[in-house]
Amino acid sequence: MNETRIIEALTVWFAAHARDLPWRQTRDPYAVWVSEVMLQQTQVKTVLTYWRRWMRVLPDIASLAAVDAGKLHKLWEGLGYYTRVRNLQQAARLIVARHDGRFPKDFEAVLDLPGIGRYTAGAVCSIAFDQPHPILDGNVIRVLTRLFGIPGNVRERETNRRLWQLAEDLVKRTCRRQPKGSPSLFNQSLMELGALVCTPRQPRCGDCPVSDWCSARQHSHINDLPNLGPRPGTLQRRFAAFLVRDGRRFLVRHRPAGGVNAHLWEFPNLELASQDDAPREAAQRLFGFGPETIELLGVLKHSITCNRITLEVFALSGCPRLSASGVGEWLTAHQMARLPFTAAHKKIRLRFAPAGARRLKA
Ligand code: SF4
């Protein structure tokens, strides 16, 4: 059967070519779990630094369950999608409460934890516990659709179901091989092939261990697969952010719990309604009174999912009432550097209010 030879070829290739990543040096389910959550939406080279620092500061489930929200968010600052880190802590607290602080081995119990879906549960249970559960992320989807010539839109339910079934058949077949194969190594080999060889553009088919059986290669469909359906449109949005200072201190605010980017810090800002929406009026709407002077400091570009954000940064002066208004908090550049900021506002902080800078424009 081709499937058996594919499994054999992939695991042999993985043994010889796998990257030496620190979370592959351990079978600690906590370490694997943290790496998998960080790797969602984030590249390996970025995750390396974050994961090492995280494991130094929060080496186990108990330390994650106990850490305060400020420190937790600071460790995640820059990775984005902050719901992930809040779910990590919520899940850690449940593991302490329900499982005596030990990561559960039962797949259903893992799936029951906040922020853990079928992919993450499959990844942790297969990689850490060597259980035959499938995984299906972007890399695996690319490999499977090309290898088995699956033309359907992968975002549609039927194609998605078929891909999960295929991934499950393969990982289960791994266990039936003689000698018995490892679900952990097989799943990782699929992901690694997608990351290193079967890449979105210009896959290295000449170096691919399964090219002999690859449908897309045989039928010249590589560039058509995977079928991702129509691309979602992008949304152009324009924001004004205001740098208001009182001597060495800047006005910043803490985003409220429950909303987007909850618990993170930012400079006062608001979305402008249109290209004609003037920043002075925007400041008036935000603070309740207009500034004496308003000066454009710079324009930053930022993208989140399909949002293309233009962030115009203004220095305001002549807002004496703001100091006593109770709008936000007044912090020095050094104090701000210790706090987690949203990605866009971290850019503002580093560019216009860096810790260590002597005197910024008043
Ligand atoms: Fe991907 Fe090419 Fe390998 Fe097919 S032969 S699985 S397209 S790298």
Image: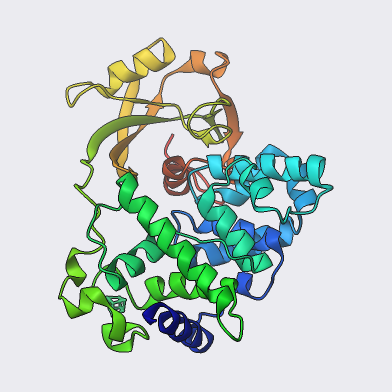
Of residue 256 and residue 244, the one placed in the foreground of this image is: 256
How far from the left and from the top, in percent, is residue 353? 48, 43
Task: Tell which of 346 and 256 is nearer to you.
Answer: 256
Location of residue 192 in the rendering, given as x and y in whole percent from the top left corner: 45, 74
Quadrant of ligand 1 in image: bottom left
Q: Residue at x 44, y 72 (%)?
A: 190
Q: Where does residue 285 sit, x and y in percent of width and height? A: 36, 13
Q: Quadrant of residue 48?
A: bottom right
Tell me the quarter of the picture where residue 122 sits: bottom right
Q: Is residue 58 visible?
A: yes
Q: Is residue 268 above or below residue 7?
A: above
Which residue is nearer to you in this view: 252 or 116?
Answer: 116
Which residue is at a point 36% across and 19% down the rendered structure image? 283
Residue at screen point 51% across, 80% down: 19
Q: Residue at x 39, y 10 (%)?
A: 289
From the viewer's perspective, is 264 left or right of 282? right
Q: Does 31 appear above or below 236?
A: below
In the rendering, at what x and y percent does residue 300 appear? Answer: 32, 44
Quarter containing the C terminus: top left
Q: Quadrant of the N terminus?
A: bottom left
Q: Is residue 137 visible?
A: no
Describe residue 357's horizontal placement relative to residue 88 as left or right.
Answer: left
